[in-house]
Image: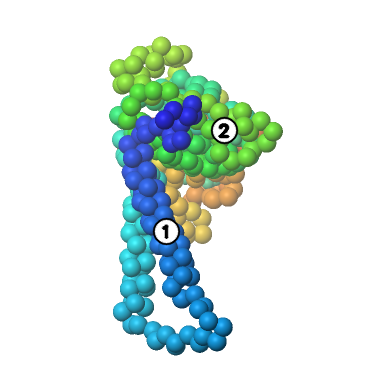
């Protein structure tokens, strides 16, 4: 039957059939119990109906096995739902290590994407089929939500911090992208498309749109332009700590606590340097709030991530 619109979105990612299987299981369990309850209502209404004006029902004694059964069976079923759902949830929120990282910036009312190789696109996202893709997302203004029905992923995109989600497209095609969080007048127009290409075609697309600098190079040039280098010189003998090898490592802070240097930490270090002071340094770093765009921040982070670890270890000795 062709209704002219799909009742169910296409399955175009490795996660899609798994999410659907769980969904259909939940629907089946619900339908079964709704049916059972309605059947019981009808049968009991007839069987135990009042037959005479002066009829008095016989008292009913409880049955232990019945009580146990209707506690244990629903418990078992809900545990199946919980464990099954939790496994899929963790798989959706833990990207594989080899995932290709693409950054997404949402704003009223468009989606901007930036590839590590430097290409950027608006309301379009080209991805390769058969390779995990991790999205690092943030917003320039209000809360948006990145929703790809065909891939069964949906993730809030928040101003002031990074959220991420990953997927692996399983078949080439063009899929719809929606904003799923009401974000102002043109919210309904905040749509785009995801183009999943076979790896060879994706490479071709990448080289076709090449405009020169990769994200790391762009980050390096911002690093120079903003004068970060004057304090963060490699070697760490300067006024600020060396940033090489920082990413993913624990950082000791003034006051004795430690944090892991992830994207949010680096972002905060640039926009609000006084929020966390690195142990052994003075709070002399100026804020770069209002000077760096969201894209610029992502480029700086990409650059800092790319700096090799050897230097930092040496510098801290
Ligand atoms: C005036 C000197 C100065 C400039 C300019 C400066 N920083 Fe810093 N930065 C520091 C100092 C000092 C610290 C350590 C104290 C602190 O946490 O504020 C620091 C800390 C950091 C950290 C945390 C490092 C760690 O080891 O945890 C990051 C990341 C960082 N800066 C990035 C930048 C970037 C990117 C720029 C340029 C946009 C920049 N800084 C410009 C002085 C500077
Ligand atoms: Cu939106």
Residue drawn at (44%, 88%) of the image? 59
**Quarter in which the N terminus is drawn:** top left
- Which residue is at the front of the view, 242 or 41? 41
Which residue, given by chain and number where applicable, does mark 1 sit on? 35
What x and y, as percent, mark residue 40? 43, 67
Left or right: 137 with respect to 142? left
Q: Which of marks 1 and 2 precedes in the sequence?
A: 1
State whether residue 17 is above or below residue 251.
above
What x and y, as percent, mark residue 210? 43, 14
What x and y, as percent, mark residue 67? 36, 78
- Which residue is at the front of the view, 206 or 150? 150
State whether residue 234 is above or below residue 57.
above
- The verdict on label 2 being within 8 Å of ligand 2 is yes
Colour scheme of the rendered structure: rainbow
Residue closest to the far right:
185
Determine if residue 212 is in view: yes
Q: Quadrant of residue 70?
A: bottom left
Which residue, given by chain and number where applicable, does mark 2 sit on? 106
């Amino acid at each position: 039957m062709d209704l002219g619109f799909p009742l169910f979105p296409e399955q175009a990612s490795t996660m899609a059939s798994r999410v659907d299987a769980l969904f259909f299981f939940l629907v089946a369990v619900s339908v079964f119990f709704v049916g059972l309850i309605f059947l019981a209502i009808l049968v009991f209404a007839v069987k135990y109906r009042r037959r005479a004006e002066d009829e008095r029902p016989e008292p009913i004694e409880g049955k232990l096995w019945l009580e146990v059964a209707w506690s244990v069976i629903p418990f078992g079923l809900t545990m199946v739902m919980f464990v099954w759902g939790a496994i899929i949830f963790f798989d959706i929120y833990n990207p594989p290590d080899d995932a290709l990282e693409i950054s997404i910036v949402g704003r009223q009312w468009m989606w901007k994407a930036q590839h590590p190789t430097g290409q950027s696109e608006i309301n379009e996202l080209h991805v390769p089929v058969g390779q995990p893709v991790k999205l690092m997302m943030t917003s320039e203004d209000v809360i948006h939500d990145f929703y790809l029905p065909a891939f069964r992923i949906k993730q809030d995109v928040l101003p002031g911090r990074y959220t991420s989600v990953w997927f692996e497209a399983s078949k080439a095609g063009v899929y719809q992208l929606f904003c799923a969080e009401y974000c102002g007048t043109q919210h309904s127009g905040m749509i785009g498309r995801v183009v999943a290409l076979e790896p060879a075609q994706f490479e071709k697309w990448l080289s076709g749109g090449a405009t020169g600098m990769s994200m790391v190079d762009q980050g390096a040039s911002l690093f120079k332009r903003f004068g970060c280098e004057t304090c963060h010189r490699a070697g760490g003998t300067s006024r600020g700590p060396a940033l090489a090898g920082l990413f993913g490592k624990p950082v000791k802070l003034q006051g004795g606590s430690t944090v892991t240097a992830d994207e949010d930490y680096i972002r905060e270090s640039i926009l609000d340097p006084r929020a966390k002071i690195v142990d052994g340094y003075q709070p002399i770093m100026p804020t770069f709030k209002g000077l760096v765009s969201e894209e610029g921040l992502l480029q700086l982070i990409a650059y800092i991530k790319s700096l090799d670890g050897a230097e930092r270890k040496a510098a801290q000795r």
